[in-house]
Structure formats: C-alpha cells, structure tokens
Image (spheres, rainbow, N blue to C red):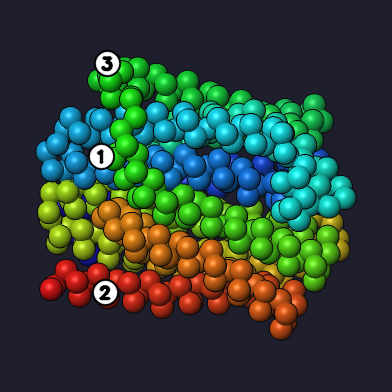
C-alpha cells in the first residue's frame, strides 16, 4: 500500500480521472435512455451494434495517447525533458494521421460493417444511421481522446477532467434537444456526440497553443523509433478500450442466434450499464499511470509496487460494489431505458448474472494497466490478445452448452481464466526482477 506521504499525490491523479470516467459512464447511460424512450428497442439495439466501431475510434486515440504519455512520463522521470517534449509532438502527429482512414472507412462502408457485426432488419437501419453521422466527427474524437492522456501526463489532471465533463454535459443537453425535442432519433444522438467532441477539441487545441504547452513544429515531425515505441506500448491500452466491444460483437452474434432480437435488446441495455462499471474500474489503472511511469523512470521500484497494490485494492472493491449495485437495481434498469414488456424480465435476470465478472475484472485489467505503465509491452499485450481470443472460445462453448443462459455467465468464466494468466505473468516478472 502507498505511504501516507504518497496519498495526496495519488488522489490528485486518481480522483479527477475517476470523476471523468464516472461522468462519461453516466452520460453514456443517459444517451441510451433517450434513444430507448424515443426510438425503442430497435434504436438501442442499433446503437449497440454500431458502438464497437465507435469504440475503435476511441481505442485509436487512447492507444496512441497512452503510449505516448507513458514513454514521455518515463523520459521526464529520467530528467530527459527535451525527449519527453519530442515524444508528445510525435504523438500529436500520429493522432492526426490515424483519424483519416477511420473517417473514410466508416463513411464509405457503414452498412457493410454493421451487417458484419450482427445488424439485421430495423436494427441494421438504425445502426447505419448512427454510424454515418459518427464518422464525420471521427477526427475530433481521436484527437480529444488521444490528447487527454498527454494532458494528464503533463500534470494537468484537473483540466483534462473539466474538458471531458463539460463535453459530456454538452452531449446530454444536445441529446435531449436532438432526440427528444426535435425527433432526430439515433442520428440525433450521433449528432450530439459529434458536436460535443468538436467543442472539446477547441479546448484541447487551446491547451496546446498556450505558450507553456506549445509544441515546436520540429517536434511534430515523425520519428521512426518513437512511432514504433508508441505503437508497441499503445497496443495494450488500445486493446483494453476495444475489448468490451469485442465481447459485445461476439455476444451480439451469439445472442442473435440463440435468443433473437429480444436477447439483443436486453444485451443492449446490459452493455450500457456494464460500460459504466468497467470504465470506473479502468479509471484506477489509467489514473495512476502517470505516477507509476514517472517513478518507473526514476528507478523507484518500491513506489511502483505500492501504487500497484493500492490499485488492486481499490479496483477489486469497485468490482464488489458494482455487483451489489447491479443486483439492487436489476428491476429498475429496464424501466429507466424504456425496455418493452417482453425484454424487461430478461434484463432483470441477466444483469446480476453478467455482473459477477466485475469481481475478477478489477484484478485483470489493473494488472494490464500496470504492465504498460512500466513499459512492459510484452506482458500487457499478451493479456489483451489472450482476452480477445478467449472471449470468442468461451462465448461459443457456453452458448453451445447452455444457450442464452451460458452467454450471460460467460464474462465471469472469461475473467476467472484471465486472473490465472495475469497472476502467472506477475509472478514471472517478479522472479525476473529478483534475478
């Protein structure tokens, strides 16, 4: 556990990040509530089908931003200020470049992509409508999401929090206007997201244009070795951001086969709520990353270990709290989202079963965050790739054996297996450091 003297610094990074992630989760739930009441089950299911593609945008920004943020913090911890600044500049260049193919791909192939992800009938129409609008704001989302870790790693955690919270507030207000008042449906929800991200981008742009944070033009030029390091280290946070959506795709396809549109509509609500708990747990690892990376650069192994163990305690506690809350509100959630009478009992049954996984999720994902914070890309990438593969196998086997009930329980089986793998990797790293 961290010492008393480390508590203020720990809270300085953790609390704003937790608040940012919490508000993002709340805003996401509100977004689903508006769509559910205005459009119905098909609208919710459509957004759920398209959302993995939205998360690919977020994952691209998060992966590049966290990769650049970690290695710039490690350089700063070593006293290499100029190199740290150079890394930030290269990261900004990569964020701009990454946004262009995403914009083109989603604009040209929205229907084909949504069909592959399990969309059919009215659900497919709603998904395509949502994705085509989201595509227009892809550059803003990539840049805002990617610059947030860079801003946090500069110590401006409160500013990063304020930008995200304000953007979320704008999103909710516009959601209400576009979806509920003006009847724009799923397209309106997407339009609200795009406008709110454009607003956030203006704040981020202002931050980097300020004389204290301005990046010289020469530092914006690409550097092969830095780009390679960012991509290598950013693969894990990229994967962590995308993993819930990999699960969503696999679950959507399996639930569509075994349970039809009723199961899909129920899972759409569960996925909204699950996202809230998952990002709360993820905020622990991401919030402390700048501290762990700086201490890693400074060679303070004891501080790194204390931060990691404190993160475990907090994240696992969040997992238990999340499970308790989901059990308590299992009957209220369907009403909140305006679910139909046939879908309500499915949600009330499946939500607590699905939520058991949070107990294990805190350990597995905090471990992955720890690995990339200390520049151990091999271990972090191993966990991410393993989760992406195992989720497919587990959902297939559980669906084959127990149909829909097995799919609801599959996240817990997945996270239990990953706990064993994460523990093994931690033990090997500890043994290697001793030698």
- Residue 428: which numbered mark, if any? 2
Residue, x 66% and y 58% (percent of image)? 249
Residue occupied by mark 3: 211
Marks 1 and 2 sit apart, C-alpha to C-alpha, by 26 Å
User: Residue 309 at x, y = what percent?
Assistant: 27, 65
On screen, residue 300 versus residue 408, left or right, reads left
Of marks 2 and 3, which one's residue comes earlier in the chain? Answer: 3
Task: Note whether residue 134 is visible.
Answer: no
Label 3 crowd (10 A; few <14 / some 14-19 / many >=20): few
Mark 3, secondary structure of its residue: loop
Tell which circle, 1 or 2, labels the residue nearer the N-terminal end. 1
The residue beneath circle 1 is: 72
Number of the front mark, 2 or 3? 2
In which quadrant will I find the N terminus?
bottom left
Q: CA gap, disc 2 to disc 3? A: 45 Å
The kind of secondary structure element at disc 1 is helix
Q: Name the residue: 72% across, 38% down.
A: 109
Query: Which is nearer the eye, 231 or 371?
Result: 231
Q: SS at mark 2?
A: helix
Please say if the residues under marks 1 and 3 sit with CB atoms less than 8 Å apart.
no
171, above or below 10, in the image:
above
| Residue 70 pos. (x, y %) | 29, 45
Relative to 120, residue 201 above or below = above
Left or right of 295 in this view: 276? right
For this view, does 242 lie left or right of residue 74? right
């Amino acid at each position: 556990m961290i010492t008393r003297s480390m508590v203020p610094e720990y809270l300085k990074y953790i609390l704003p990040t937790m608040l940012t992630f919490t508000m993002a989760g709340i805003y996401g739930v509100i977004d689903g509530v508006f769509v559910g009441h205005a459009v119905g089950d098909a609208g919710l299911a459509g957004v759920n089908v398209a959302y993995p593609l939205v998360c690919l945008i977020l994952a691209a920004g998060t992966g590049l931003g966290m990769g650049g943020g970690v290695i710039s913090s490690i350089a700063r911890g070593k006293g290499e200020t100029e190199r740290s600044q150079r890394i930030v500049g290269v990261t900004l260049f990569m964020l701009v470049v990454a946004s262009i193919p995403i914009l083109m791909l989603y604009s040209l192939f929205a229907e084909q992509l949504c069909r592959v992800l399990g969309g059919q009938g009215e659900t497919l129409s709603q998904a395509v409508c949502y994705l085509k609008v989201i595509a227009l704001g892809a550059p803003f989302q990539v840049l805002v999401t990617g610059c947030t870790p860079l801003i946090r790693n500069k110590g401006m955690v409160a500013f990063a929090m304020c930008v995200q919270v304000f953007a979320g507030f704008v999103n909710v207000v516009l959601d209400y206007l576009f979806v509920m008042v003006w009847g724009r449906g799923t397209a309106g929800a997407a339009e609200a997201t795009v406008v709110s991200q454009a607003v956030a981008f203006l704040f981020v742009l202002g931050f980097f244009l300020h004389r204290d944070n301005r990046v010289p033009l020469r530092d914006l030029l690409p550097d092969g070795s830095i780009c390679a390091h960012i991509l290598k280290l950013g693969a894990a946070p990229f994967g962590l951001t995308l993993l819930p959506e990999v699960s969503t795709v696999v679950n959507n396809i399996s639930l569509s086969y075994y349970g039809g549109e009723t199961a899909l509509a129920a899972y759409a609500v569960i996925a909204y709520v699950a996202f809230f708990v998952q990002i709360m747990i993820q905020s622990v690892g991401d919030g402390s990353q700048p501290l762990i990376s700086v201490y890693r650069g400074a060679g303070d192994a004891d501080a790194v270990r204390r931060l990691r163990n404190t993160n475990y305690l907090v994240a696992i506690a969040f997992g238990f709290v999340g499970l308790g809350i989901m059990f308590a509100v299992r009957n209220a959630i369907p009403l909140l989202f305006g679910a139909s009478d046939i879908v309500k009992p499915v949600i009330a049954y499946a939500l607590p079963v699905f939520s058991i996984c949070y107990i294990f999720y805190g350990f597995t994902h905090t471990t992955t965050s720890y690995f990339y914070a200390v520049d151990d890309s091999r271990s972090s990438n191993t966990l991410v790739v393993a989760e992406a593969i195992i989720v497919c196998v587990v959902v297939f086997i559980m669906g084959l054996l127990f149909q829909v009930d097995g799919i609801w329980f599959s996240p817990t089986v997945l996270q239990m297996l990953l706990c064993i793998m994460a523990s093994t990797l931690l033990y090997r790293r500890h043994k290697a450091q001793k030698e």
